[in-house]
Image (spheres, coloured by chain):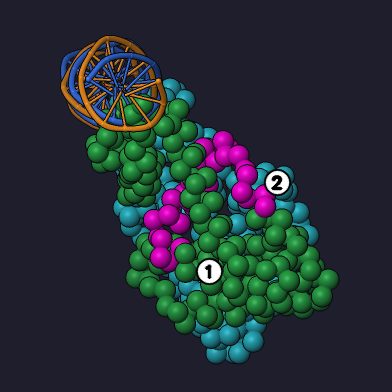
Chain colours: A cyan, B green, C orange, D blue
Amino acid sequence: MRVRDENKVEAILQQALKMVVEEGFDGLSMQKLAKAAGVSPATIYIYFKDRDDLLVQLYQLEVDKYFDYVLDDFDPEWSFAKGLSVQWKRRAQYIIDNPDKAHFMEHFSFTPLNDKVVLTHRSKFVEVMHKFITGAIENKELVKMPLEVYWSVAFAPLYNLVKWHKAGKNMAGQPFELTDEMLEQTLGLVLKALRP
Amino acid sequence: MRVRDENKVEAILQQALKMVVEEGFDGLSMQKLAKAAGVSPATIYIYFKDRDDLLVQLYQLEVDKYFDYVLDDFDPEWSFAKGLSVQWKRRAQYIIDNPDKAHFMEHFSFTPLNDKVVLTHRSKFVEVMHKFITGAIENKELVKMPLEVYWSVAFAPLYNLVKWHKAGKNMAGQPFELTDEMLEQTLGLVLKALRP
DNA sequence: AAGATAAGTGAATATTCATTTATTTATAAA
DNA sequence: TTTATAAATAAATGAATATTCACTTATCTT
């Protein structure tokens, strides 16, 4: 039996991600992707049922990698300030180091394909987060609030800043570059918002 | 001379927006759009140079409408708390009342077409915002920070909550519905973050 | 070394795509 | 009413699309 070449499937996935970021979802065609990945179009269909399946699998793989990175070593018993700071900086580091992956994940979530995503890894992730903020609320380190409100206040500003940083321009089209100082300040503001 | 039918161009634009939201940018074809709008494909090319031009114009029109709504009656001389609250609630109202428009605008901004957008109305908007927060900083009503940091902390959480509300599920795929109480609380947290 | 089997492929399929062309239609001005 | 003109269209164009098919190739097992 001929052996499976894992480089091929990895090349397909990473080229697909790159093409979506550079040309949008409507810029991704199977033939162009095959050429970019150095395989035959038919090879893609060995590993993926169809185009949608490829994109959904790619998204799930990237989300898993991201959450693995963010959760690594995380201990829900940490103080709220430490736990949030560590998570926040991990996220910042990952998405600044991997702007294409971050852009793909966010872009994907606005796509109708988002409805096809099934959750595996993520439920574990949310469990840990839930335990973390429930504990923080009990210890009076965090104002009582729904998980979604916490998450939005804590992390949405970060994603927004990185989005503008990647685009090189702010909401008005003016040049914008994110600095460490801005990140520090934003984290400070977020901590201030959430502490009782 | 035959007279221009403005209903036609409006139908084209609104059907395009709807199709993008429901089927993604790769679900928008000119022939399907023409059929949905009740016109011939060739008619679209009377009003728009090509597919990209249609989408870019649509985006700019929607952004202009949104910002007009948000800016209406706004006075940069208001106190920081009042100015932010008014803006925040206006935004919340508009995007909750017009979920498709909001979704389209956000989705678009992750698309390569975003690079083709030129700014007219928006620079005036940013001017007003800049004056507002500069004044607030001078009056010691707002911590000193870049406009982009202010914007991200103030509004990104709102957009995130509405995004989950529209999807009907949160970051973990669990059912989610945004309540007025959550909105109130989020605004409160944002105000707390930004005030000295 | 031979056989079995899954990986991998190039070329073809029918379909859909964005856009154009030749033509008709409606209306404002004469 | 006639004329000029831009709006509007149906039908057509060639290019690009996702996917499949018949076939070849590499490698493990025997």
| Residue named by callout 1 | B90
Residue B148 found in image quarter: bottom right
Residue B189's label in the rendered image is none
Q: What element carries label 2?
A: loop
Q: Which chain letter goes with mark 2?
A: A
Residue B137 found in image quarter: bottom right
The disc labelled 2 sits on which kind of residue? Gln
**In the rendered image, is residue A17 in sight?**
no
**What residue span does the magenta drawing correspond to?**
B95-124
Crowding at label 1, few (<14), some or many (≥20) Cα neighbours within 10 Å? some
Q: In this view, does B144 lie to the left or right of A57?
A: right
Residue A98, position as x, y percentages in the image:
60, 46
Is B181 covered by the magenta stretch?
Answer: no
The quarter of the rendered structure image containing the C terminus of chain A is bottom right
Q: In this view, does B183 lie above or below A171?
A: below
| Residue named by callout 2 | A174
Q: Is residue A31 above or below residue A54?
A: above
Q: Which residue is drawn at 52% across and 45% down?
A: B60
Front: mark 2 or 1: 1
Residue A48, position as x, y percentages in the image:
31, 38
Q: What element carries label 1?
A: helix
Which residue is most to the right? B138
- Considering depth in this image, is A177 or A104 the residue closer to the camera? A177
The quarter of the rendered structure image containing the N terminus of chain A is top left
- Considering depth in this image, is B177 or B99 the residue closer to the camera? B99
